[in-house]
Every structure is written in structure tokens, then in C-alpha cells.
Amino acid sequence: MPGTHVSGIDDGVVLVDYKAAAALDAVPRTCCSGLESPQLPVLIDQLLGELHAAFKAEKDAGYVIDNNQDPVSFKRLNQRVQELLKIYATSNPGDWRRFALFNDLHYVRNLVEANDDFELIVLCWKGGQVSRVHNHAASHCWLAVLDGEMREIQYQRIDPVVDGDEKPGDVVHVEVSKSTDMQLGDVGYINDHLALHSVGCYLSPEELPERIALNSRAGRNGWQLEGSVTLHLYSPPIRRVKIYEDDTVTERTPGYYSKGGVRV
């Protein structure tokens, strides 16, 4: 991504050059909108229970869950998952905070639960921490904003590999196709048939004190907003991810900064 530089930590991290980021204002943006929020789930254990039930229903009906899923099955699952994430993000009392570990150098992935069907991860982003442009293999990716402000930037390949099988070292050019600003309660979805993307907290460090003060005046004592927090659901769990940087494809294994709220 022009105007950014890698932090040196192998966790898909890019730090923002704010002058370059400002240039993205020329790209058309959208704002996410969610579903109406019923009463449940308001606790993360309730959310997990509802997610298990939703995935089990599709599997029991004989459907394979990945980004080539039967369209009718996917439509049903996608609607339910987005509804659940929206409800949780807007109604929870903050029980996700026990998973919310930050790092000064790079954004981090904090595992809540992983099983054969999906992995649920709390990602924590300090101001200026942004992921590299990446894919999602054969998986669905849902994300919801739990706190702060985020931006998702989608990319399309300009010259995709002819056989569609990109390998590390291949030259692949990508360009920005859409930029979406996301706030508390917004839910997004992406898979490799739609686009590549990067996600990040574009607040500068200078903006954070004001945000913390606003947070305190809103009565959220005990939680000093350091940047942003997002909840990501990948199905099936992603074992290898491709990174698109400097017109070159690399590949890596995603890791976890913590599991169950405990640093690993």
C-alpha cells in the first residue's frame, strides 16, 4: 500500500502514513448499516451458543460451509450471523474486555474460541495499526466493531494469475476498489470471490486523548479506549493467509496473541 511501512512484526501489520491515508478520501466510501437488535445475545457465551446452533443447522441439512457454499444455505447463515453479531456488538455489557489485549507495536488477534466450524477472535487496534492487504482462503469472514472506529479498504486484482492459483513470489497488482468507515455495531462480510481487503484503526495518536475523554464523559469508566476493538468470525478457521504487498504475494500462518484472555 503506497505511503505505509511495515513494522517488522510478522503479524500482518502496517503502520499508517497519515498523509497517504488522507488521499483515500478520493475513493468512494460507504457506511455500514445493521439489522434491528432484539434482546439476545448480550453475553459472549450466549453469542457462541447461537453461532453453534446456526452452523449446526446448516451442516445437519447437508451443506458444506465455506466460500463456495450453496447460495440458499449461505443466504440463511449470513443473515443469521450478521444479526447475531449486530445484536451482540450493540447490546453487550462489555464482557469482551477480558479478551481485549493490546500491543504498542502492532494489532493483535485474541482467540475467544476455535472449533472445526469457525474461530471467533477479538482483534485490538491502537491508533495507526492496520493489517496488510490479505485474502481469506476458502473461508467466510464476518467482522463487527465492538469499540472505536475502523476502516475497511477493499482491493481488486488488476492482473490476476491466469489459473487462479497464486503462489508465494508471484507478481500480483492490486488497487483500491472501495473504502468503508465502520463504527460501533457495524457488521461487515467478505470472502475471496468479492475482494481482498485490509482493516485498521486510522485514528492518529494525537486524536486518542480526545476520544478517551469523550469515552469517560459517556460514563464508560474503567475502560480507556486505546484505539478500536473488532470481533471477527472466520468459517472455516483460516490456516494459511496470502499477503499482497509491493506487488508480490507472500504466505503466512496466522497466530494468536492470547487465548481465552491469557497471553500465549
Image (spheres, helix red, strand yellow):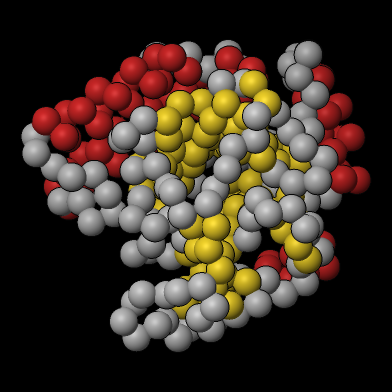
Where's residue 186, x and y in %? Answer: 51, 39
Direction from residue 47 to residue 263 in the image, left or right = right
Direction from residue 235 to residue 44 in the image, left or right = right
| Nearer to me, 199 or 111 | 111
Where's residue 205, x and y in %? Answer: 87, 45
Q: Is residue 223 visible?
A: yes
Query: Toward which corner of the image does residue 125 lie, by quadrant?
Result: top right
| Nearer to me, 55 or 33 | 55
Where's residue 229, x and y in %? Answer: 64, 34
Residue 204 vertical position relative to residue 170 in the rendered view, above or below: above
Q: Is residue 214 visible?
A: no
Residue appearing at x 78%, y 13% in the figure: 221
Residue 183 vertical position relative to residue 169 in the rendered view, above or below: above
Quadrant of the image containing the N terminus = bottom right
Where's residue 211, x and y in %? Answer: 81, 34
Give the residue at the far left of this rendering.
61
| Nearer to me, 207 or 159 | 159
Residue appearing at x 79%, y 57% in the figure: 7
Task: Count how many numbered circles sit on residues in the image.
Answer: 0
Residue appearing at x 64%, y 55% in the figure: 12
Residue 169 vertical position relative to residue 72 in the rendered view, above or below: below
